[in-house]
Amino acid sequence: MERYRAIIIKDGKIALMERHKKGRHFFVFPGGGREKGETEKECCEREVLEEFGIKVKAKNMIYQIFQNNTKQGFFVCDWIDGEIHKTDAEEYTKKDVNISGTYDPGLFDLELLKTLPVKPSEIKDVLIEDLKNNKNLDFALKTIDVENM
């Protein structure tokens, strides 16, 4: 399985999906599974539009991880158009939140990234360090080791 996620930074804020699920509170980067016939970039752009209601342009994949037999790629994305909001995507229309949890898309101060429980934490940690050294996040793909969940 392949999943692609977006790193969207705008005006000192980062786009994240806030989750509450089975007593846990955490954040994830927007994204999801690749559909048949879709490129990696197309997957990332579609997932952001579906989940956040904004149009983005996926630029370069800067991180990849392999976790639980799944490849995940993380693209730096430019925000093209729209405002973040809940859409009619599956995440928001599930009837039983006790099973699926809640989903709340939002923009969060980049400075808070250090303290937010973002998953996977290994990507969060590398991103924080990389932002110190290269604010444009313009570098070659890095494969990040993560612990299996």
Image (cartoon, grey):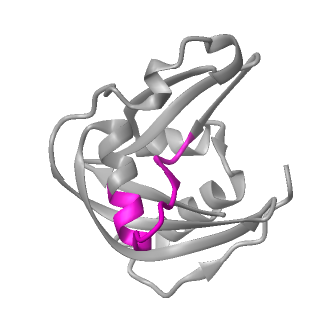
Q: How many marks?
A: 0
- Confirm whether the magenta stretch covers residue 36: yes
Give percent across and percent down for residue 104: 45, 25
* Residue at far right of view: 148
Give percent across and percent down for residue 149: 85, 49
- Confirm whether the magenta stretch covers residue 71: no
Q: Is residue 56 above or below residue 93?
A: below
- Left or right position of 28 against 137: right
Q: At 43% across and 67% down in the image, what residue appears?
A: 75
Q: At 64% across and 23% down in the image, what residue appears?
A: 100
- Left or right position of 21 against 49: right
State which quadrant residue 123 falls in: bottom right
Give percent across and percent down for residue 1: 66, 63
- Left or right position of 55 against 118: left
Residue 134 visible from this viewpoint: no
- Left or right position of 107 against 131: left
Q: At 39% across and 31% down in the image, what residue appears?
A: 89
State which quadrant residue 68 falls in: bottom right
Depth check: give the residue in front, 97 or 118: 97
Q: Which residues are magenta?
A: 28-45
* Residue at far front of view: 36
Give percent across and percent down for residue 113: 53, 44
Q: Is residue 48 above or below residue 148?
A: above
Depth check: give the residue in front, 95 or 58: 95
Q: At 26% across and 37% down in the image, what residue appears?
A: 53
Depth check: give the residue in front, 135 or 65: 65
Residue 36 visible from this viewpoint: yes
* Residue at far left of view: 81
Q: Is residue 23 above or below residue 28?
A: above
